[in-house]
Amino acid sequence: MMKKKIMLVDDEAPITRMMRRNLEATGRFDVLDVNNPMLALETARRFEPDLVFLDVMMPGKDGGDVAADFADDPQLSKIPIVFLTAIVSKKEVEPAGSTIGQHTFLAKPVRLEDLLTCINDHIG
Amino acid sequence: MLEQLGLAVEALSMGRYGEYDQVFDMTNSEQYPPVVARFAEAFGMMAMKVEAREVRLEQMIDDLTRARDELAVSNDRLQQSLKELQQAQMQLIQQAKLESVGRLAAGVAHEVKNPLAVIQLGVDFLESQLTGNTPCLETVIDMADAVQRADTVIKGLLDFSRSEQLDLRPSDILTVIDDSLLLVRHELNSRHITVESAKASSLPELQLDRNKLKQVFINLFMNAAHAMPDGGTLTITASIHTLTDEELSISGICNDTFEAGNRVVMIKVADTGTGIGEEAVTKLFDPFFTTKPVGIGTGLGLSITRKILELHRAVILLRNRSDRQGAEAVMLYKMINYKEGE
């Protein structure tokens, strides 16, 4: 079975590293982490992810701007984006993500099982 | 002649002014010897001066007495103003403290969540790699619990910093109480706590943020539950009440919202627990103050509770019950546009 491709965009390398290790350990995903938000668009065009996890508050370019770039790009506009952020609390979102506006949000710190449920909901 | 003089001297010495007129009759030098006439004139003048001084003195005493009374009244007013100023100052300090904690809380919450996310995901990864290694797995599970506890505190901080905005709608506070009770029912049952209610069958609708107010009641119910580790009774009363001067002064309610004669909705949440210790009374609403064991309370519940109620222009008092059988929280909500019979 083809592995699903997950792209992680967060300026905190330890977070993307931990997420990548967890997801790769399931054997179901190819994971690529990007710690410079300015490179997210270019990397996504090459990697062609099935799903993107995107931090909101990042230096240089915030998650909202990165998501807007994806929406404006014909190659990337259909790729589902899940915001993974510390600015919402778990009380405000469901464990496996809630939709606020048009986007799904996951609250940090997220548990692996919630991450997997969220992935299944989007590209399962 | 001598007798006349003697009577006049006695009258003057006894302060019976006006009774020495006869002395003036003796100033006639044709009827009396010149020395007597001069003496009578000098005596009469002296007597008049004494009388005038006496009158002035009485006037001065009256003025002084009046001034003293006025000073006493002013002093009372000053004392009252001083008391109100001290209360206002305490409120300002408390408010400033809460605002700085709120700002700090939002910043800390954001900064701490990222490292927590790393630890949480690291724990999840280790858990998946350590199958069969029981001691290591147990260690990892302890670490996961610690992350959850830290996350609970952070969640409290975020709630605290975000309790500024309210979504006010006309609501029935009794429904909010019942909904909140449902959410903690299991917790209360497991602690063998019985719930008793003495609520008015209906109360006028109040402008409430139902979700935030649920948080208030859940906090109060859970505090009551923690105060009754061996079981007990949680009593909820809700009624319409008219505030008296005495209640306002005893309770220390010092804001612009309430005055004597106001009709209020009064909610009481009483427990049969250990009561509030003297040392805790002044600190109960301070952020991070808790009397609960480590890991049980964040010390933010009551700060959040009071902040939410203040945004509703309501007040909360925490005190020991008058029968000393536990503690009670008393909340007052001002009824706006309320007419008798509604």
Image (tube, coloured by chain):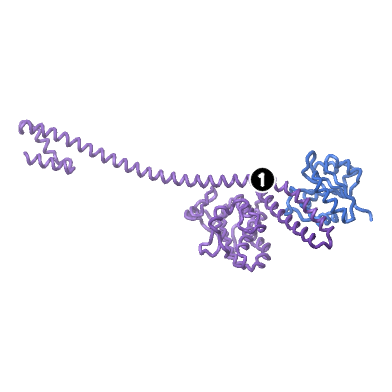
Q: Is residue B177 left or right of residue A61?
A: left
- Relative to B28, does residue B121 appear above or below in the rendering? below
Whether residue B228 is visible to the viewer of this picture, yes or no, is yes
Residue receiving disc 1: B104
Q: How many marks?
A: 1
For the point 83% across and 59% down, which residue is it?
B130
Quarter residue B319 falls in = bottom right
In the rendered structure, the colour chosen for chain A is: blue
Residue at the far right: name it. A1
For the point 32% across and 43% down, which residue is it?
B65
Percent across and percent down for residue B203 are: 59, 60
Q: Is residue B131 left or right of residue B51?
A: right
For the point 64% across and 46% down, which residue is it?
B101
Whether residue B199 is visible to the viewer of this picture, yes or no, is no
What letter labels the chain drawn in purple? B
Percent across and percent down for residue A57 are: 77, 43
Q: In the image shown, does B103 or B65 lie closer to the viewer?
A: B103
Q: Chain of mark 1?
A: B
- Relative to B145, does residue B86 appear above or below in the rendering? above
Q: Tell me the SS state at disc 1.
A: helix
**Residue type at the position of mark 1:** Leu
Q: In the image shown, does B231 or B258 lie closer to the viewer?
A: B231
Q: Is residue A106 left or right of residue B216?
A: right
Percent across and percent down for residue B25 are: 10, 36
Percent across and percent down for residue B10 are: 13, 43
Quarter of the figure with the N terminus of chain B = top left
Q: Is residue B306 left or right of residue B77?
A: right
Near mark 1 (Cα within 10 A), the count class, few <14, some 14-19 or many ≥20, is few
